[in-house]
Image (cartoon, rainbow, N blue to C red):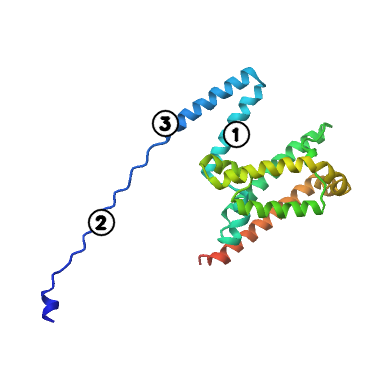
């Protein structure tokens, strides 16, 4: 007891942690922006006038992707790994908006007797579609990003995405080389489905929006179940 009473009292001194001030990247961003504008002007002057616009659009789109962390891979991966479906619901909202926008563009061309734009993207549905989707999905999860997400993270300096981009290019070239054989022997005889041909223009929009709405509700319920979120009383 005496030793305890005579023991020196140690006072806890609060530690002051000094964080290193982050260096402002605004000057670098302004320099890069000015270089992009100069490159866009030069490209428009010496090449096609739309080339500069494509460059600027790509830069702005990449900036938005980087700041929003928008990624199709994460929208399908996060619900299974973390239970979060915020990106999933964002992708579904984007699908809903593009459904309305692209339908308006296509229907306007159809109503005026013009060729419907984008019909070359209505591809045959076959077993190759399912197999390719599964393989690409597995690859996206392993690589940590889809095509747009990989390009965005390459710009951020992630080495894994640089490696994924290299093999992405190799696989694309290999696929383009053998695409003729696959198209002739597997894909060509498969059916093409264009929803307005089946349900009419209004029916196609309503059905697609209903499917998107159901997926949105299912994603929200999944997140609540996985994360234990309860409705406020």
Q: CA distance from mark 1 to mark 3?
A: 21 Å
Labels 1 & 2 near each other (Cβ < 8 A): no
Q: Secondary structure beneath disc 2?
A: loop
| Crowd band around label 2 with a 10 angstrom C-alpha radius: few (<14), some (14–19), many (20+) | few
Give me the disc on residue 27. 3
Q: Residues within 10 Å of mark 3 (few under 14, many from 20)?
A: few
The image position of residue 191, as x and y in percent, is 86, 49
> Residue tagged by mark 1?
58
Residue at the image position 67 percent from the left and 41 percent from the top: 169
Q: Quadrant of residue 118?
A: top right
Q: Which residue is mark 2?
A: 15
Give the x, y percent position of residue 78. Answer: 58, 57
Q: Secondary structure at mark 1?
A: helix
Eye-nearest disc, 1 or 2: 2
Residue 40 — which label?
Answer: none
Label 3: state its secondary structure. helix
Q: Earlier in the sequence, mark 1 or mark 3?
A: 3
Horizontal relation, residue 98 to residue 32: left or right: right
Q: CA distance from mark 2 to mark 3?
A: 34 Å
232 to 207, vertically: above or below: below
* Mark 1 neighbour density, 10 Å: few (under 14) some (14–19) many (20 or more): few
> In the picture, which quadrant includes the N terminus?
bottom left
* Farthest residue, direction top: 45
Q: CA distance from mark 1 to mark 2?
A: 47 Å
What's the residue at 34%, 42% (across, down)? Answer: 21
Left or right: where 79 falls relative to 120: left
**Is residue 210 in view?**
no
The image position of residue 164, as x and y in percent, is 61, 46
The residue furthest right is 189
> Sequence order check: which comes first, mark 2 or mark 3?
2
């Amino acid at each position: 007891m005496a030793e305890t009473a005579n023991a020196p009292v140690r006072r806890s001194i609060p530690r002051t942690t000094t964080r290193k001030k982050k260096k402002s990247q605004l000057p670098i961003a302004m320099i890069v922006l000015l270089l992009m504008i100069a490159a866009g002007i030069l490209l428009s002057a010496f090449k096609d006038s739309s080339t500069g616009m494509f460059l600027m659009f790509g830069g702005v789109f990449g900036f938005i992707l980087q700041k929003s962390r928008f990624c199709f891979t994460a929208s399908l991966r996060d619900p299974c790994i973390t239970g979060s479906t915020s990106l999933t619901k964002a992708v579904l909202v984007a699908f809903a908006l593009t459904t309305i926008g692209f339908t308006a563009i296509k229907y306007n061309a159809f109503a005026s007797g013009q060729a419907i734009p984008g019909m070359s993207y209505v591809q045959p549905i076959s077993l190759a579609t399912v197999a390719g989707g599964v393989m690409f999905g597995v690859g996206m999860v392993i690589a940590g990003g889809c095509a747009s997400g990989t390009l965005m993270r390459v710009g951020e300096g992630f080495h894994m995405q640089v490696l994924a981009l290299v093999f992405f290019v190799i696989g694309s070239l290999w696929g383009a080389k053998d695409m003729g054989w696959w198209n002739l022997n597997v894909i060509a005889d498969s059916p093409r489905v264009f929803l307005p041909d089946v349900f009419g223009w209004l029916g196609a929009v309503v059905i697609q929006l209903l499917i998107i709405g159901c997926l949105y509700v299912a994603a929200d319920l999944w997140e609540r179940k996985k994360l234990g979120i309860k409705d406020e009383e």
